[in-house]
Structure formats: structure tokens, C-alpha cells
Amino acid sequence: MNTPPDQYGVVGHPVAHSLSPFIHGMFARDTEQNLVYRLHEVPPERFRGYVLEFFARGGRGLNVTLPHKEAAASLANDLTPRAERAGAVNTLMLLEENRILGDNTDGAGLVSDLQNNLRVPVEQRRILILGAGGATRGVLGPLLMREPAQIVVANRSVKRAQTLLADFCDLGPVRACGFDELPAEAFDLIINATSASLSGEVPEISADVLGAHSVCYDMAYGKSATPFVRWALERGCARAVQGLGMLVEQAAESFELWRGVRPQTAAVLSALRRHAAEGRN
Ligand code: NDP
């Protein structure tokens, strides 16, 4: 008799647009893992009960996306150090004795995309991060570990950036400010970690932060260039990319945690880029 596949999935609200089933489906096929990965559309008020029941019924792991990442951190019995630091969880995994582990693979995913796929160095670079939400919390620790010269976190609401700063300033040279307090100096790397692109907007910042050598990275991604990527290219930056690579790399981190095998990401990323170019995602 065939062994039933292990159950995985992504829980979010909304989640119908998620590319994760495609990504994990390819990982599972390429690494010959017997698993299924499904979408779980769950509103905030049902999140805790839904997830506990998923694991009680033998589910093995879940990715967690907006708006549940903080709730997932509270629900987990154990947190990895990077999830504890972020205060947000994007990966849940069933451990022995029905304990649930929470991890955050967003930062490792971003760093891997920058360093391995895009060959964009972080070490000794001046980095500007726009936004101070969950995504910034996830990536700040792993970026600071790569010893950049400085990270400036700028947010629409300055208070939120300052609160975030207090949780990370022991890790390296990081400071917080509002969009209108940004220095008129070009950064080496500018990461848009706001959700502005999702509503067709661009954070209201001066183009003085862009130089001809600046690389711009939008964590958001879409069928065509995001508003931030267009904004950056129109103002003459060296290069501007979307966050599809981060999505695939954070998924690979989750997959390795769950299955103990590291999937290759290049073919998955190419397939997603092809689908996007054909307008199918
Ligand atoms: P949150 O809701 O936690 O935070 C949203 C942030 O965006 C806040 O800093 C908010 O500022 C800011 N913001 C929203 N709208 C605007 C606007 N019009 N102008 C300026 N700032 C704005 O979201 P997350 O941090 O979880 O996600 C942020 C982005 O990162 C999303 O686009 C998400 O899809 C993407 N992401 C991509 C991943 C990938 O793998 N590629 C992984 C994780 C996230 P304020 O505090 O002032 O409201």
C-alpha cells in the first residue's frame, strides 16, 4: 500500500494569489518528497484554532503569510532565534510530542537572493530599507549579520521605525527615520519593504537617495515591473529587481527545515519568471 503524502500548506488572508503551492510542488517533485501543499484561506479570528487543528490532524508544516505572522509567533511552542528576534513567524513545523516550532525564513531568503542569485553584496554597503512592518522585522537581523556599513530604516510612521529599531540596534549600525528625514546621499542598496506597490503606490521619498550605482530591490513582485521598480529605473539607478527570488529562496529554507533536504531554486525561479512574462501568475 502507498504511504499517504505528508500535509503542508500556506495559511493567509487572502491567499488565493499565492505562488507557494507551485514552488513547493516543484521542490517536492525535484527532491522526490512525498507531500502535498495546499492553500488555507483563514481569517484572523479563526487562525489559532485552524492551525492547531491542522497539526492535531497530522499536518506536518505550514507557511504563514499576511496577516498572521505575529499570531503565528504567539502560537508556536518554540521559536528559532531568528523568529524570536523578528517577533514574526512565516514557517511552522510539527516537532516531537506535538510541539510546534516557529521559524522566520524571510531574511535568509532575501540574503540568499541578493548574494547568490543577484550577486549584490551586503558587506560594507550602505543600505536603506523602506518600511518597518513584519517583512523588515524578518530581514533586519540576517542583513545586519552580514556586516553592512550602515542600515537606515525609513518608515511613513516614524514611531513604528523607532520601535523596531529598539529591538535590533544591538546587532549592528542601524538607525531609524521618517521619509522626510532621509539624508540627501545615495545608498548602495535600497530595499522597498513597504506594501505600497500592492496598492500601485511608491513610498514618498526623495530621489536623492538614488545614485547611478544604487541597486533597488522591491520585496513585492508582479506580472510586470512594480511601481517602485519603475520609479527607480526612471531615475537612473544601476539595477532594480522584484522580490520573486526572495519568495523562492525563503520557500527553499522552509522546505529544508521541514524535509531535511535543500531544493535547487534556479529552475523554479526561471519557471515563475516565464509564467509572469506570459501573464499567467
Ligand atoms: P506590513 O503590513 O507588516 O507593513 C507594511 C509597511 O508598508 C509598513 O511599514 C507601512 O507603513 C508601509 N506602507 C504601506 N503602504 C504604504 C504607502 N502607500 N507608502 C509608504 N509606506 C507604506 O507588511 P509586511 O512587512 O509583511 O510586507 C511588506 C511587503 O513585503 C509586502 O509587499 C509583502 O508582499 C512583501 N513581502 C515579500 C516577501 C517575498 O518573499 N518577496 C516576503 C515578505 C513580504 P506604516 O507603518 O506607516 O503604515
Image (spheres, grey):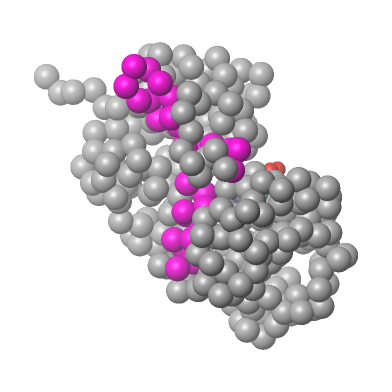
Give whichever of 35, 124 is nearer the camera.
124
Q: Is residue 101 above or below residue 158?
A: above
- Place of residue 182 in the rendered image (x, y in percent of width and height, measured from the top left): 81, 68
Total numbered labels: 0
Q: On the picture, is 127 further left or further right than 124?
A: right
102 part of magenta stretch:
yes
Q: Is residue 211 above or below residue 17?
A: below
User: Would you identify the image quadrant in which residue 240 lies?
Assistant: bottom right
- Place of residue 272 in the rendered image (x, y in percent of width and height, measured from the top left): 44, 56
What's the residue at 48%, 33% (across, down)? 79
- Place of residue 172 in the rendered image (x, y in percent of width and height, measured from the top left): 61, 61
| Residue furthest left as drawn | 1
| Residue furthest front as drawn | 170
What's the residue at 57%, 19% (across, down)? 48
> Visible in this render: residue 240?
no
What's the residue at 46%, 38% (across, down)? 80
229 part of magenta stretch:
no
Question: Which span is picked out in magenta?
Answer: 86-115
- Place of residue 10 in the rendered image (x, y in percent of width and height, measured from the top left): 48, 34
